[in-house]
Amino acid sequence: FAFSPHPGEDMHRLESVSLFLAFSLSLLIQSQGTAEDWPQFRGPNCSGISQSKSPLPVKFSADENVRWSAELGDGIGCPVVAAGRVFTSAMVDEKTVGLFAFDAATGKELWKRTWPAGDIPEIHKTNSQAATTPAADAERVYFYFSTLGMLTVDAKTGRDVWQKELPVPYFVFKWGAGMSPTLYKDLLLFVQDDDLAPAFYAFDKKTGELRWKDDRGDMAVNYSHPVICETDHGDEIVVAGTGLLVGYDPQNGKRIWTAKTLLRNIKTTPVVQDGVIYISLQSGGIANQWLASVDRADTGNGDGRLTRDEVQAFVGKRKVPEAFFEKTFGRGDTNKDGALEGDELDKAFLNTENFAGARFDSPTPGDEFIVAVRGGGRGDVTKTHVLWKHATKHTDHIVSPFVLGGRMLLIKGGGIATCFDTKDGKSLYGPARIENAGEYFASPIYGDGKIFVAGENGSVVVLKDGPELEVLSVNDMGSPILGTPAIADGTLFFRTRAGLLAVSLTTVARK
């Protein structure tokens, strides 16, 4: 840029350059997203913590402080936000799944994609066939559906980018598929611990190329998302599972460390703060679940033995795959009498190399506990990197912990809160009621000094973040909420069972 002898021309050129730089910066921000994005399940690193500095409302409802709303089909997956767009899924009808994109500020529908759902299995009434949460950046949206595999579409247009078929997961219990993809740098991460082919996949997020895969055949059914732990050795991908917390090398998917700290299965997702992984866990024995479920369904005779016929009768019309029987009965039926009992149940439902189950050996025995593990180890780190572990009767089997400011907050079904010091796991307060005694499936999220806890009954409790429990408000959203809400740019996004609501202190004409 050369200056002209005419000042007016110089000023015009400077204005042009300034506009060009501003436009370029805008494109760069749009292409990369912003720090305020909520790109996956529970936001940045699955932590539930918003980086937004914008104020958020304390009081709201299905009518108050609603910026915009949209009606959708049934779904319990979480909304995600990237580059000013919000994405969520729904069952458009019983045979069709849909993925939706809205302008996050105005609620304008940008695009809608639908796919035939195919032969979908029967699931528990609490669940939904549209149960998974998309992941998104400024360029693409990544969406998993059990019968379709991993679908990737253009974030601006909804057009196909790439698709990868994956083994259709099988769950003997009718919990159904519920795992969602997450993002790490140029990788799309996906863990599917089902009853047949549990595995951890890492795809190139641009092309869909499989970078690496870890066979997790030593795991029972789990629903825990991968999180990133920054250490002196570099980043580690950490995944909780049956009996084990596992640290992976992001470059090749190799297991670089394990901590024998967990139980039979896990549905909560850990939280990482300053190189430490915090976990809350509640899990009954898988073998006991089997016997109890079969007997409750009147398909067993209460003799403490489990036969193939009893399993098939419990499952119902859908035939149990022979591969499942080979994996379970073939491993557990040591005396070959066609039934499982006693130790055979644990041998069947848990890998022989896995210490969990009836053989679970811990200084804090029990089916509920909290634990802190420092990342960065190598090999078996159970004795070297477990900072503390405490039994408690106040964890939830689905709701993930919230960790911030040296405190670990747990919300349990029934609306019970307990809080612990992250330094040593000692109790700070609770158990105490949070003024909404319902069931909880969504995990707590944080923004603007407040913690938002959404209940299945549609009520959202707002807590003040602090060393003591302080309820600021209880807000009725008019429809059940099972998916964890999202926060971006001063707006709360709630995926109710009926639709999507954007709540903020600034409202626009509602959709």
Image (tube, rainbow, N blue to C red):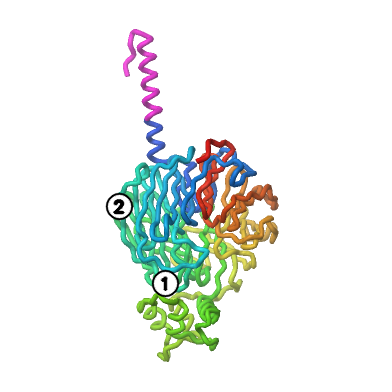
Residue 12, quarter of picture: top left
Q: Does residue 184 appear anywhere in the picture?
A: yes
Residue 266 spot, x, y in % from top left: 51, 66
Tell me the distance, in whole angstroms, between the alpha carbons under discs 2 and 1: 27 Å
Q: Which residue is mark 2?
A: 162
> Is the residue marked by circle 2 packed among few (<14), some (14-19), or many (20+) residues within 10 Å?
some
Classify mark 1: residues with Cα within 10 Å, few (<14), some (14-19) or many (20+): many
Secondary structure beneath dot 1 equals loop
Residue 132: % across, % down: 44, 57
Q: Secondary structure at mark 2?
A: strand
Name the one closer to the observer, 394 or 408. 394
The residue wearing badge 1 is 195
| Residue nearer the viewer, 434 or 352 | 434
User: Is 5 included in the stretch rendered in magenta?
Assistant: yes
| Residue 103 on image: x %, y % | 45, 40
**Which amino acid type corresponds to the residue marked 2 in the rendered image?**
Trp
* Residue type beneath disc 1: Asp
Q: Is residue 382 above or below residue 326?
A: above
- Which label's residue is closer to the chain start, 2 or 1? 2
- Over which residues does the magenta segment extend? 1-23
- Which residue is at the far top? 6
Name which residue lies at 69% across and 53% down: 469
Q: Residue 193's image quarter? A: bottom left
Identity of the residue drawn at 49% across and 75% down: 355
Q: Main secondary structure of the magenta part?
A: helix
Q: Nearer the viewer, residue 202 or 126?
A: 126
Is 241 located above or below residue 137 in the figure?
Answer: below
